[in-house]
Image (cartoon, rainbow, N blue to C red):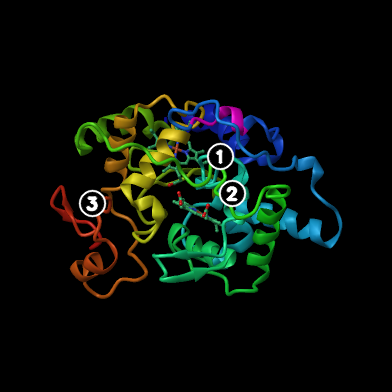
Amino acid sequence: MVLAPTLTLAPLAAQAADGGAVPSAAPVAASSTPGAAQAQHFTPPAETAMPSGDFGQSVKLGEQIFIHTKEYAGQYVGNSLNCASCHLDAGRKADSGPLWAAYISYPAYRSKTGHVNSFAERMQGCFDYSMNGKAPPLGDPVLVALESYAFWLAKGAPVGTDLAGRGYPKLAAPAQKPDYARGAQLYAQHCALCHGAGGQGQSVDGKTVFPPLWGAQSFNWGAGMHEIQNAAGFIKANMPLGLSGTLTDQQAWDVATFMDSQPRPQDPRFTGSVEATRAKYHDSPWSMYGKTVNGHMLGSE
Ligand code: HEC
Ligand code: HEC
């Protein structure tokens, strides 16, 4: 019973996860920035234009790491996600944290770290939090390959400007207060088929087909996706996979609230107390860390 949706939907996911098979213009046309459905985005080079030689090999390796992170960089990964689980079409898709827009935006100051981050340091952050792992040290071949891939995807992009489609879209404040119960209902209706009733995702032969949204194998409490406004923007623009843009903004807020009110791995910056960790790192209306939901204090799992 659980396998039926996997078998039906796996080709869809495989297509989405395989940047190579999709013409580079397709993700642009499919993107759904609220209020700007036809927005023009930078087009990264086609897969067939990938260079050869030593540099080309590094680009190719970076792409493989990005799509199959555990297989290619397993020592740095602590969950079942791949980079491409949240950066769709292998980091090509606008409104899904595309690598071409990211690459040209660093070095940059980040309040999260309190200093200017290089591009490599920014990627380390996604290893520590989104991948619930231990980031490769600067200069590690894994980071060099990932940076080569991002650099190549940004070929021809203007430098020092925010490209349209960077990051996840910022949704306008919700009309109604986001609601956990409405979100639970939406989740069962629009998400559980792929991500599982318990948010655990689905894998086949040890490979993640549908990534976990919460629980031990998902992103941790320090990840950007745990903040409701980030998740709402991502979901609105990208989910349900293949039907992006079909949820209203309010529905995206509601289902993001439900998803981000579930247990997940501890924030690696944990100070020893949930209250103190909330005060130091999660003092925001968008973080449920330290809040009690259904009798459980989130962050104490
Ligand atoms: C659980 C989801 C998730 C996973 C998995 C993930 N990321 Fe991210 N990533 C995010 C979020 C959220 C942001 C911030 C997006 C924003 O600023 O709107 C981000 C931002 C980034 C940025 C900066 C984007 C920019 O425009 O500034 C880079 C680079 C990046 N991620 C690389 C990676 C790499 C490399 C991996 C795999 C090792 C990875 N990410 C895995 C969620 C994820
Ligand atoms: C048709 C199957 C399908 C449906 C339905 C679907 N998703 Fe996804 N979702 C995926 C796949 C596959 C990915 C990983 C991206 C990829 O591989 O291209 C993903 C990625 C995600 C991610 C980022 C990765 C992670 O694990 O955190 C979030 C968050 C997410 N989905 C939320 C939702 C929500 C909320 C809904 C319902 C509104 C939903 N999805 C419906 C297939 C689906």
Q: Amino acid at mark 2?
A: Ala
Q: Quadrant of residue 220?
A: bottom left
Can you say which quadrant of the picture contains the N terminus?
A: top left
- How many callouts does the rendering have? 3
Judged from the image, the secondary structure of the residue bearing numbered disc 3 is: loop
Q: Which residue is mark 1?
A: 94
Q: Which residue is mark 3?
A: 285
- Place of residue 132 in the rendered image (x, y in percent of width and height, measured from the top left): 44, 62
Whether residues under marks 1 and 3 lie with C-beta atoms below 8 angstroms apart, the answer is no
Residue in the image at 57% along x and 30% along y: 12
Please state which amino acid type lies under the numbered disc 3: Pro
Q: Is residue 262 visible?
A: yes
Report the span colored magenta. 27-32
Does the Cβ of the disc 2 residue fall within 8 Å of ligand 1? yes
Task: Give me the disc on residue 117.
Answer: none
User: Where 274 sits versus 232, above or below?
Assistant: below
Ligand 2 resides in the quarter of the picture at top left
Q: Residues within 10 Å of mark 2 (few under 14, many from 20)?
A: many
